[in-house]
Image: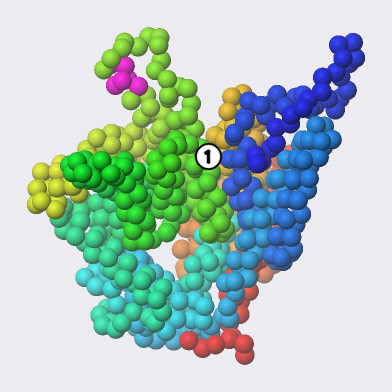
């Protein structure tokens, strides 16, 4: 059943009798939706995600999951009744659409409430004393001081089997996914966000099963112990070890920085990248290449399909009795499933797998492989499995870019050759490819910009040009060379394609370094209101999910988002003790910090979109005494009409906040 039902059985009015207002509204509704037939169902994951996101807006004020699911069932029943009742179906079709929307919204709210209730666990007591931990490395990435690893603990917290640890760079020969380590560490509870829009470590850890964070003292030693008890834990450690071995085999075969880049590109293992290269990818706008995405799935699936079709076609007896294309598609589906298990089910990887699986299943049943409906199904599956992904920036960037690219693919401009002003033949194909490459980079960059800037408070100024330069290298050099090396490696003939692959990787690294070192490579944006991000995201999906002139409705939504952001922008942040502040004044931006607050001042500058190299003011700006009333953080924002308002910032409530607060001590806690 479509989300917005298309009414039938219209009863025309007589020629001499004017239409009533209800009949005119119904005719307008029919005219709008008739052109959008088959598109309304694509809004299902959007409504489901809005329901899940509503919980995070006011989590302590939400009803129970049973009430939400009962409300969803009631809306479903009313929607079916409205669709089947002749009077309502004829005259009030928007009422049925409203019931459909309410069903998916309440279902998303009910599932996130159910998931939160399932994850609730007693908070362990964490003190600042050093302790010895034994753990397995699940994932690792470089940071400024060494490594940031996700560790599965040998003796986990109750309901929290993981911890995030910072390890020094002298452990580089020990750190790899699946490795068992023994370290002397200091743990702390997960932090709440300091400012609006900051990374919420406590909320992230609540949904990922992370119980604490900390850092290691000195060098770790090999653990030499078996994986934790339980089938799921052993499978996770085994798959992490396979991932680490594959990454190191790829890096060793290619060598140098290109090998580390290949390990991130093909397997998603970023532990071999230097911190400088990792920052370069962020500054150049090429960080998405380090996430396992659709290219990886299609590379593996294409190789398996080619091998199976070639193998079946080479045996006439098999070719007569086995459908080669469908058998190859089924084998590729199994290979992609194994690849997902090894790389881990992040939002981007899970989206890529579901999209590849839908396309391969479409081949099996003879349907169209790439469509907006397939993307909507993929988004709904991810949200059903992880409803908290509704506020995950990785989820938004992955699906926003995919939706924009699918909308571009479905457009007449992309699917039909232009007949005017272009010569036929090779020249036309080359010009169309260049135009589509520019268009794909432009729409993908524009689609991911709201989530990226809202999350990181900055933008890669030249990211569009970096992606334009990297796209043909990735498409015409790296992808074919990686595919050929994969196909020829069983026969020992992969030397030539590996050399070509290394040259392509070196070219992308050169592009990224040149762009990252360019002037104004990183543009500070600062924090903008959550309502602005919501409206920008809604305008994006409005433009992608509808067709025709109805897409123009995205313009007023986007304009409203920009107006709201400008009229409610932060202009100052103060710590009420007077030791830290960042402020925009008529004389320019100013900052001030006490001797122990340099890191907090850097966060303040980032939140206001001030330059990183802005030095603290030698003389503090005079601040009204009314601000200094306690230990709170004071936010100063402009309001419509030219004035300003002050507000005290406190992290939004939630069950993860109650868990974090309980870690200060108490009889109900358990010692680690």
Relative image position of residue 488 (x, y in whole percent) = 14, 47
Task: Give left or right: position of 672 versus 313.
Answer: right
Q: Quadrant of residue 150?
A: bottom left
Q: Looking at the image, is 65 positioned above or below residue 393?
A: below
Quarter of the figure that contains the N terminus: top right
Q: Helix or strand or loop: what does disc 1 sit on?
A: helix
Which residue is at a point 51% across and 81% down the rendered structure image?
158
Q: Main secondary structure of the magenta part?
A: helix
Residue furthest to the right = 17
In-front residue for pair 60/408:
408
**Furthest residue to the bottom?**
667
Frontmost residue, 149 versus 494: 494
The crowding category of the residue bearing disc 1, from other C-alpha atoms within 10 Å (few below 14, some 14 to 19, many at least 20), is: some
Task: Measuring from the top left, give residue 475's x and y in whole percent.
Answer: 28, 37
Residue 54 appears in the figure: no
Picture coordinates of residue 426, whole percent (x, y): 26, 17
**Residue 67 found in image quarter:** bottom right
Q: Nearer the viewer, residue 324 or 615?
A: 324
The residue located at (34%, 43%) in the rendering is 326
Is 83 left or right of 150, judged from the image as shown? right
21 magenta-colored: no
Q: How many marks?
A: 1
Does 204 sit left or right of 633 as displayed? left
**Going 76% across and 54% down the picture, which residue do you hit?**
74
Identify the residue position indicated by label 1 in the image: 373
Q: Is residue 490 above or below residue 66?
A: above
Q: Position of residue 239 (x, y in %)?
A: 32, 67
- Residue at position x 70%, y 45% in the image: 101
Image coloring type: rainbow
Is residue 230 at all visible to an observer of this figure?
yes
Chain part drawn in magenta? 427-432
């Amino acid at each position: 059943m479509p989300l917005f039902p298309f009414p039938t059985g219209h009863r025309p009015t007589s020629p001499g009798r004017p239409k009533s207002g209800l009949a005119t509204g119904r005719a307008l509704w029919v005219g709008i939706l008739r052109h959008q037939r088959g598109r309304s169902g694509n809004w299902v994951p959007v409504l489901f995600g809005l329901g899940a996101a509503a919980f995070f807006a006011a989590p302590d004020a939400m009803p129970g999951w049973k009430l939400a699911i009962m409300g969803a069932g009631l809306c479903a029943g009313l929607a079916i009744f409205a669709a089947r009742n002749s009077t309502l179906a004829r005259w009030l079709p928007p009422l049925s659409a409203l019931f459909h929307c309410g069903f998916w919204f309440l279902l998303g709210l009910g599932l996130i409430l159910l998931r939160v209730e399932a994850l609730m666990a007693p908070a362990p007591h964490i003190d600042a004393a050093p302790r010895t931990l034994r753990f397995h490395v699940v994932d690792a990435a470089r940071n400024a001081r060494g490594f940031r690893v996700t560790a599965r603990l040998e003796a986990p917290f109750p309901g929290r089997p993981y911890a995030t640890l910072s390890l020094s760079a002298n452990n580089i020969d020990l750190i790899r996914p699946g490795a068992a380590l023994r370290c002397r560490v200091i743990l702390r509870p997960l932090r709440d966000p300091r400012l609006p829009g900051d990374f919420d470590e406590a909320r992230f850890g609540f949904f990922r099963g992370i119980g604490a964070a900390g850092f290691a003292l000195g060098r770790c030693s090999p653990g030499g112990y078996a994986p934790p008890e339980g089938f799921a834990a052993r499978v996770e450690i085994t798959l992490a070890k396979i991932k680490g071995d594959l990454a190191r085999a790829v890096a060793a075969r290619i060598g140098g920085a290109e090998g580390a880049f290949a390990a991130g590109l093909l397997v998603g293992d970023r532990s071999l990248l230097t911190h400088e290269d990792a920052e370069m990818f962020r500054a150049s706008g090429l960080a998405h290449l380090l996430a396992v995405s659709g290219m990886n799935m299609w590379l593996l699936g294409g190789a398996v399909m080619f091998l199976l079709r070639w193998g079946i076609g080479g045996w006439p007896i098999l070719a007569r009795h086995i459908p080669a294309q469908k058998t190859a598609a089924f084998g590729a589906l199994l290979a992609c499933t194994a690849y997902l298990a090894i790389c881990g089910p992040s939002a981007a990887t899970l989206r890529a797998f579901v999209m590849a699986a839908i396309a391969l299943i479409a081949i099996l049943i003879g349907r169209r492989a790439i469509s907006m409906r397939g993307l909507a199904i993929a988004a709904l599956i991810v949200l059903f499995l992880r409803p908290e992904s509704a506020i995950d920036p990785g989820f938004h960037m992955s699906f926003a870019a995919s939706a924009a690219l699918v909308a571009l693919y479905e457009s007449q401009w992309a699917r039909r050759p232009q007949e005017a002003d272009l010569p036929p033949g090779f020249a036309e194909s080359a010009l169309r490819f260049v135009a589509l490459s520019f268009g794909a980079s432009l729409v993908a960059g524009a689609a991911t910009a709201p989530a990226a800037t809202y999350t990181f408070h900055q933008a890669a100024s030249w990211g569009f040009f970096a992606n334009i330069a990297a796209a043909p290298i990735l498409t015409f050099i790296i992808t074919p060379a990686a595919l050929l090396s994969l196909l020829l490696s069983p026969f020992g003939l992969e030397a030539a394609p590996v050399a070509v692959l290394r040259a392509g990787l070196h070219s992308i690294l050169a592009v990224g370094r040149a762009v990252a070192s360019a002037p104004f490579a990183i543009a500070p944006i600062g924090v903008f209101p959550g309502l602005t991000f919501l409206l920008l995201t809604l305008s994006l999906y409005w433009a992608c999910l509808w067709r025709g002139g109805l897409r123009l409705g995205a313009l007023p939504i986007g304009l409203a988002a920009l107006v709201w952001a400008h009229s409610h922008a932060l202009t100052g942040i103060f710590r009420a003790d007077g030791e830290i502040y960042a402020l925009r004044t008529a004389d320019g931006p100013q900052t001030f910090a006490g001797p122990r607050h340099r890191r907090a001042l850097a966060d303040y500058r980032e939140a206001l979109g001030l330059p990183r190299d802005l030095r603290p003011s030698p003389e503090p700006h005079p601040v009204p005494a009314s601000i200094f009333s306690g230990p709170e953080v004071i936010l100063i924002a402009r309001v419509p009409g030219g004035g300003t308002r002050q507000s005290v910032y406190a992290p939004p409530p939630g069950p993860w906040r109650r868990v974090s607060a309980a870690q200060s001590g108490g009889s109900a806690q358990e010692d680690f």
